[in-house]
Amino acid sequence: MIEHRLIEKLLKVAARLANELTQETYDPVLIDSIVDFIKTYADRTHHGKEEDILFHELSGKRVGGNDLIVMNELIDEHKKAREKVKAIVDLNERYRNGNKEVVSQIKGIILWLANFYPVHIEKEDKEFFPKSEKYFSSVELEAMLEEFWTFDRNMIHEKYQSILTSIGGKLGASE
């Protein structure tokens, strides 16, 4: 849940920037930074731990009906957020190719994300996470926490390996 606080802070800043956004003040590099934060930190790192570790571990438990419904809603919400971020990436590329009209669409999606995440986070913090703990022993919870730390440690290497691959691909390098 600590990660939620950082996501909330970024989205407040992003919403403020989006509210002030015009075609004249639009900065595609700033949008790239917001997208990178959401894709790497909020989605790949944070949602990755939820989906790849917590939800995976829960799939081996006898999860109660409503808890299972909420977990599936959260997974669907993660997918929806990914779709919105992908749309920003695509629109930002269109902006770079000369279509200034996409600024209002990008602004709308950023504001959508800024409104979506607090509701999503509240569902996790107040409803799902506290209830999901009952499915695990204290030993299992401790092991999962250790898995979260390992996941985080590996993320930095994954991110920068991806950057190297991307740069190498653009340069035609094979290594």
Image (tube, rainbow, N blue to C red):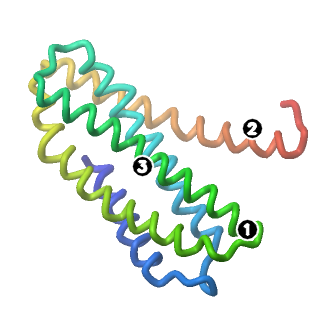
Depth-wise, is mark 3 or mark 2 nearer the camera?
3
Q: Which residue carries the number 1 mark?
A: 96
Q: Is residue 82 left or right of residue 67?
A: right
Q: Residue at x 14, y 30 (%)?
A: 67
Q: Position of residue 102 (x, y in %)?
A: 61, 70
Question: CA–CA distance between discs 3 and 1?
Answer: 23 Å
Nearest to N terminus: mark 3 or mark 1: 3
Amino acid on which disc 3 is placed: Ala
Q: Residue at x 76, y 72 (%)?
A: 98
Q: Position of residue 51 (x, y in %)?
A: 36, 30
- In the displayed structure, 162 sits above or below 114; it is above
Question: CA–CA distance between discs 3 and 2?
Answer: 25 Å
Q: Which residue carries the number 3 mark?
A: 81
Q: Are marks 3 and 2 in contact (CB under 8 Å)?
A: no
Q: Which residue carries the number 2 mark?
A: 165
Amino acid on which disc 2 is placed: Thr
Amino acid on which disc 1 is placed: Arg
Is 120 in front, or is 2? 120
Judged from the image, the secondary structure of the residue bearing numbered disc 2 is helix
Q: Are marks 3 and 1 in contact (CB under 8 Å)?
A: no
Is 88 in front, or is 5? 88
